[in-house]
């Protein structure tokens, strides 16, 4: 666990300080905290290539293995990452993968970072890509994807001690670049170096600009073989080091994913981008046939008053999901329906108070989330509201069929009803209800929504099927231009499944014992009345309401509302219990499972990974 600060929050949860950068007369960026330089404007790129890439044995390191995991202490301006990515792109084999993990306690504001990187034109393409997705400057893990998912940057914003303690995974090579030990001793102490050792894979390499005796002795005491190398320019020496052991490739090559909803399709994308051979298996024989087949999905979090584990998972999922879906849109997918933005309406004064506390608890800047009064809420949403709420500029209405189709493009999809999976020599054998073999796979991921409840061993998890009914409305006289949530939700005007224009109004939330068997998967008039009543209660200004049918789907929910995401056995994983938050959580939780399969640094803090652990109920 990470060290705790005031109010019992982990160090990576605290709002992050400004690095107070100044630019010297020759254009060199200087930290106002340590007083040290980030890099020399005249020779920064050459220094990175000599000290760090040369110190870890690049490009040989990525010629010898298809997947390289690099860690850095002190991300700073991102120069080391950008040079590494630039040179990796130029020389890595086809199908190669790059994971880059970095810790930074003083993230540079985007506009200032842009000004610094503008001085390095050789890296303009990579710098523009980084700046376009530069995350909010709040503590925690931020996962960024580049080159269609082949390059994954995991930024851990926070104090190095707490950040490293919160990290799980393995690293093949390290850049130790946290300013000079004399000016920033906390980055080089025994605790930090012991975490470097803990996270290092067999045969891991280390490169550092510092040749200080304390650094060399610290690495040697942790079993690294240390050697001095000639420095560059005025720096006489630098250091490289290596652990004993052989670097091996991942054990998993073929993966079966049971279920082709949003969870399964996000997993297919995450695993395929890592070069794995993926097979989707779904009893409907198509993607998004269940709850993921609704005509609209709303992307906006509901954050609690305090930084609970569930709240932090939702917050991290939202920040990642907005970047993820924007990346799909840049690839040409018609992801977004209508205007961007979303309003979480305060249903009453207690809800307004909860929203105020959520803003204070999560520390997001106004351009991500801000509280608005009724007048501004009305202006932003396009309809009159009686209450204010939370405005999420990056939220929006997602097109589920388009998203699931795009994510699963190029992935083999089998129509079969999986009934069993058995571990055997060589992998996992997957079978149907008629005991027919589907195949043997290195790994299996169970991601079948409510279908998960019918599989062997599912009784270990307190899963329940939840029935959701939504209604389709003809275009309203004055409908919203963005999605609005208020316990229920109302979409902007979109194209409905029958080709007509209208709105999606949702949704009921009923357990199995609350609905007669005959009505479980059919439309019920009383449910339509219920959701129309909720709309009238919270948005009474809306008129011209004409329902015209709807849809029923089932969602798998779990007792503590925290999804299941992680390993069940060696080679067996589960992603389930997403409830009504599948489009919010599936992108990030798929990255988590893909990293667990590949042994890479994970995209969430250790305590959140434990909270998601499927074994927590046994």
Image (cartoon, rainbow, N blue to C red):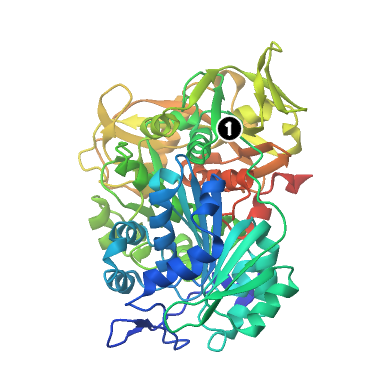
The residue lying furthest to the front in this view is: 230
270 vs 323, left or right, is: right
Residue 486 visible? The answer is no
**Residue corresponding to mark 1:** 449
Q: Which residue is drawn at the image coordinates 58% and 17% (left, top)?
A: 416
Q: Is residue 338 above or below residue 441?
A: below
**Nearest the eye: 534 or 15:** 15
Give the percent coordinates (x, y) of residue 137.
43, 69
- Helix or strand or loop: what does disc 1 sit on? helix
For residue 337, which quarter of the picture? top left
Residue 255 in the image: state x and y as whole percent: 60, 31
Give the quarter of the figure containing the N terminus.
bottom right
Q: Is residue 64 visible?
A: yes
Residue 117 against residue 266 in the figure, above or below: below
Q: Position of residue 329 (x, y in %)?
A: 32, 42
- Pick the residue in front: 179 or 286: 179
How crowded is the residue under tag 1: few (<14 C-alpha within 10 Å), some, or many (20+)? many
In the rendered image, the quadrant that contains the C terminus is top right
At x 66%, y 60%, the residue is 200
Determine whether 586 is above or below 81 in the image. above
């Amino acid at each position: 666990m990470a060290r705790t600060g005031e109010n019992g929050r982990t160090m990576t949860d605290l709002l992050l300080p400004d690095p107070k950068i100044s630019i010297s007369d020759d254009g060199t960026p200087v930290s106002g905290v340590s007083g040290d330089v980030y890099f020399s404007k005249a020779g920064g790129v050459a220094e990175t290539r000599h000290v760090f890439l040369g110190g870890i044995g690049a490009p040989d390191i990525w010629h010898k293995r298809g997947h390289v995991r690099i860690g850095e202490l002190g991300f700073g301006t991102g120069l080391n990452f950008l040079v590494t990515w630039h040179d990796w792109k130029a020389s890595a084999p086809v199908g190669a993968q790059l994971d880059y993990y970095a810790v930074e306690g003083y993230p540079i504001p985007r506009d200032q970072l842009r000004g610094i990187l503008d001085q390095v034109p050789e890296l303009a393409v990579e710098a523009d890509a980084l700046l376009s997705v530069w995350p909010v400057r709040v503590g925690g893990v931020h996962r960024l994807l580049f080159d269609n998912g082949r390059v994954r940057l995991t930024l851990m914003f926070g104090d190095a001690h707490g950040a490293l303690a919160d990290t799980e995974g393995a690293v093949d090579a390290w850049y130790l670049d946290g300013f000079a030990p004399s000016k920033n001793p906390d980055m080089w102490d025994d605790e930090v170096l012991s975490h470097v050792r803990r996270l290092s894979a067999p045969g891991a390499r280390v490169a550092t600009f510092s040749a200080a005796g304390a650094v060399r002795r610290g690495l040697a005491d942790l079993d690294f073989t240390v050697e001095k190398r000639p420095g560059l320019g005025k720096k006489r020496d630098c250091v490289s080091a290596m652990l004993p052991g052989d670097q091996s490739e991942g054990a998993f090559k073929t993966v079966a994913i049971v279920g082709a909803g949003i969870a399964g399709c996000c997993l297919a994308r995450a695993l395929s981008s890592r070069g794995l051979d993926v097979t989707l298996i779904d009893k409907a024989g198509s993607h998004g046939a269940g709850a993921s087949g609704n005509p609209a999905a709303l992307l906006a979090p509901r954050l609690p008053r305090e930084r609970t584990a569930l709240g932090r998972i939702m917050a991290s999922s939202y920040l990642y999901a907005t970047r993820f879906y924007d990346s799909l849109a840049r690839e040409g997918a018609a992801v977004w329906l209508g205007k961007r933005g979303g309003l979480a309406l305060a249903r009453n004064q207690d809800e307004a108070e909860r929203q105020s506390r959520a803003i204070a608890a999560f520390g997001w800047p106004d351009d991500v989330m801000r509280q608005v009064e009724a007048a501004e809420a009305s202006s932003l949403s396009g309809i009159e509201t009686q209450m204010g709420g939370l405005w999420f500029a990056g939220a929006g209405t997602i097109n589920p069929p388009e998203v699931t189709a795009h994510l699963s493009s190029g992935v083999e999809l089998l129509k079969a009803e999986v009934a069993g999976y058995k571990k055997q020599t060589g992998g996992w054998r997957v079978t149907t209800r008629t005991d027919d073999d589907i195949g043997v796979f290195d790994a299996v991921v169970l991601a079948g929504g409510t279908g998960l409840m019918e599989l062997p061993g599912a009784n270990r998890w307190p899963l329940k099927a939840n029935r959701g009914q939504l209604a389709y409305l003809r275009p309203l006289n004055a409908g919203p231009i963005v999605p609005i949530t208020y316990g229920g939700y109302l979409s902007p005007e979109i194209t409905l499944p029958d080709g007509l224009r209208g709105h999606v109004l949702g949704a009921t939330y009923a357990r199995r014992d609350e609905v007669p068997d005959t009505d479980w998967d059919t439309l019920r008039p009383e449910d339509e009345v219920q959701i129309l009543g909720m709309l009238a209660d919270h948005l009474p200004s809306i008129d011209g309401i004409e329902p015209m049918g709807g849809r029923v789907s089932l969602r798998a929910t779990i007792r503590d509302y925290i999804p299941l995401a992680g390993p069940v056995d060696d080679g067996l994983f589960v992603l389930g219990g997403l409830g009504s938050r599948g489009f919010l959580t599936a992108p990030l939780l798929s990255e988590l499972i893909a990293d667990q399969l590949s042994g890479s640094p994970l995209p969430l803090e250790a305590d959140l990974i434990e909270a998601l652990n499927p074994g927590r109920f046994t």
